[in-house]
Image (cartoon, grey):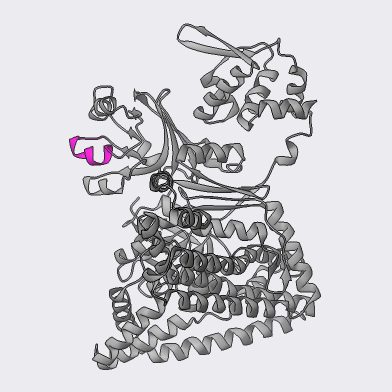
Amino acid sequence: MLYNVVVKLHLSKTSGKILKLFFYNGNKSLYVNEIVRETNSFPNSVQRSLKTLEEQDLIVSERKGNKKFYSLNKEYANLSEIKALATGNSKKGEQDKQTWVKLVNRDVSVATNSAIMKAQREAKYMGEFRIKTWDFHWYNSVTGGVYYTLEEIKETGKLLAKEVKKDTKFSVSLVENCMSDGEKLIEKTKNVVKKNLPNLSDTKLRKMLEDLVEDFMQFLPYLVIPHSIERIIESELDEVVFDLETKERLMEPTDVLSEEQIDELHLAALVKKDGWSKENERKLVQLTEKYCWLPIFNLHTKPFDLDHFRKLIDDLKSRIPNPSKEVEKLQKQEGERKKSLQKTLDEINADQKLRNLVNTAQAYIKLRTYRINILRRFNFHHLPLLNEIATRIGVAEEEIGLLTYEEILEALEKKGSRKVLSRLTKKRKEGYAMLTWNGKTKVIAGIERIIHTMEQCNILAGTPSAKREVRGNPACKGLATGSVKIVKKLSELHKVQKGDILVAKMTTPDYMIAINKAAAIVTDEGGITCHAAIVSREFNIPCVVGTRNATQILADGDVVEVDANEGVIRVIESTDFPEDLKELHGKTIYKGKVKGTARIILDASDFDKLVEGDIIIAPQTTPEYLSLLYRAKGFVVDEESITSHAVLYGKALKLPSIMGTSFARNAIEDGEEIELDATNGVVRKLSH
């Protein structure tokens, strides 16, 4: 009976919260703000749910003065069954609860995500290893958050642990299979785009892309599985190694030199000796062609050009006295690390099980970089094919990645309406998400729908910042959700893009270029007659003024809901940190203490602003960051992983560095003077 009632009503999570509140409050009537506050839900979700519940006769409403009050409909026929569901006395709904884990932040195209999620639903093998399919996955482009469920991560980890214990050669075969499959994929992709694509028929292009995507998906399990490997390695090590220092020595990367690094140092040595001769110019072109794909994690990212690598080589030759000896030194250090690892294993009398585990960890570290590079190389090499198809289906080249591969193939086959494709890309450009739930995947467009889905699926669970809020005075009523862009001076107006939330101390007529793009306006100062208030009413933009401290509490990139009906700005996704924060703590990668200018580096587009001696602040480091690190005094990364690229590069280059600061990129301003005390795992702000 209960199941039939639920199916008929389509009871959402927010509706369940509201009903639970009513049942616990008896006959009490409540108005909207009370319900929002007591259920800790977002206003737009509450308003939608109240409307639905009233349409379903579960609640009734009446207006008292200026407020509308809601209460339970005591005459509803199945009220007892609904009470059992809402108050937790029924098992229905409990099965659908998931604990989500945010693994990384990445800027990923719709096309790539569609392939990743399909591979996780359908792939059966990773090399020779049979894997479990993944039924839950969440990604949103607003914050770049990649989420999986804790249960599935653990289940995959258990399968991997079992394999490690059973097969002593598992770690070696894992890496060998990954590299073999990766190189085959890239070779096939390069051969495809060598053909004269404009002269091929639509049918031929469709078949080529279909085949490439199928091969791509066979490789993709290598992209996700390592996250489970890392967790199982750490948990297994914790059971047998109790000394933290010993554990860190066992997990310290031994293979840190990359082919790219060696090639760059060799060219720097030649340029230092002969300058930019014709031969060295030719070698520079070869270097660019070989590694230009490094930043292309997302299909719309531009490859590195000749100028990027020329600047890099000039930096290396000026910073490193003898680049050739630098290669020899790094190779010698790598050998010493391998000997040190074996010595540590011998000192603690490690059994074969522990040695297998450590070997798996080292294999994973090597795999971690390689698998990401294959993704970047695939994106780069199959772009000409996608661009040719984009022309034929009437989509801009820079927007083809906003369609799933299935949508691209269907459009090429059926030649559907270009207006339909245009609407899809336009919506997703403003913000998109992809959700796999119980093995079914859908694309969600628009920030409001993204936030609603995150709430419905409990993806915000455990995010303390969801409760952070700023209050002010409503100037123009309305609701809006979007990404915060703080504008402290006119030169920062360019930061505001369509759909963003403009946050400023106050606005003037000079701000109109940003106001025209903003979904809402929030100011520290001003009253109902200030510039922001007048302009917002003229253009009907939700606006809250007089918050006093919005520019201090909020941070660029925070996803917020502006409730200009009540004058409240709620942080939906970010990281909570105190307003007067003077230092941040993290985990030491490589010891040392340096002072310098902080540079916030979010992706390759920020590389040019780093000058010699700056300190890098980043969400994480990935392969394309390696060249940048030669110019830095040190670096800080928000993510923490003992097998990450940050650990790899920090120890290889002996740069003072820490990880796991969580929100350094939000708490530290670009250009701010800081002290990085990596020995003690602390970043101090010197401007306070």
Residue nearest the observer in this picture, 323 or 514: 514
User: Quadrant of residue 420 in the image?
Assistant: top left
Residue nearest the observer in this picture, 276 or 632: 276
In the rendered image, residue 543, in percent from the top left (x then y), is placed at 34, 29
Magenta stretch, main secondary structure, is helix
User: Quadrant of residue 322 in the image?
Assistant: bottom left
Task: Tally the numbered discs.
Answer: 0
Check the image and report above or below for 270 versus 636. Answer: below
Q: Is residue 108 magenta?
A: no
- The quadrant of the image that shows the N terminus is top right
Residue 499 in the figure: left or right of residue 511 = right
Residue 1 in the figure: left or right of residue 379 = right
Residue at the far left in the pictured view: 509
Q: Which residues are magenta?
A: 507-516
Q: Is residue 511 magenta?
A: yes
Residue at the far top in the pictured view: 65
User: Quadrant of residue 292 in the image?
Assistant: bottom left
| Res 407 seen here | yes
| Res 678 seen here | no
Check the image and report above or below for 50 versus 122. Answer: above
In the rendered image, residue 276, in percent from the top left (x then y), is placed at 24, 87
In the rendered image, residue 101, in percent from the top left (x then y), is placed at 62, 51
In the rendered image, residue 664, in percent from the top left (x then y), is placed at 45, 54
Residue nearest the observer in this picture, 209 or 487: 209
Residue nearest the observer in this picture, 215 or 246: 215
Residue 86 in the figure: left or right of residue 449 = right
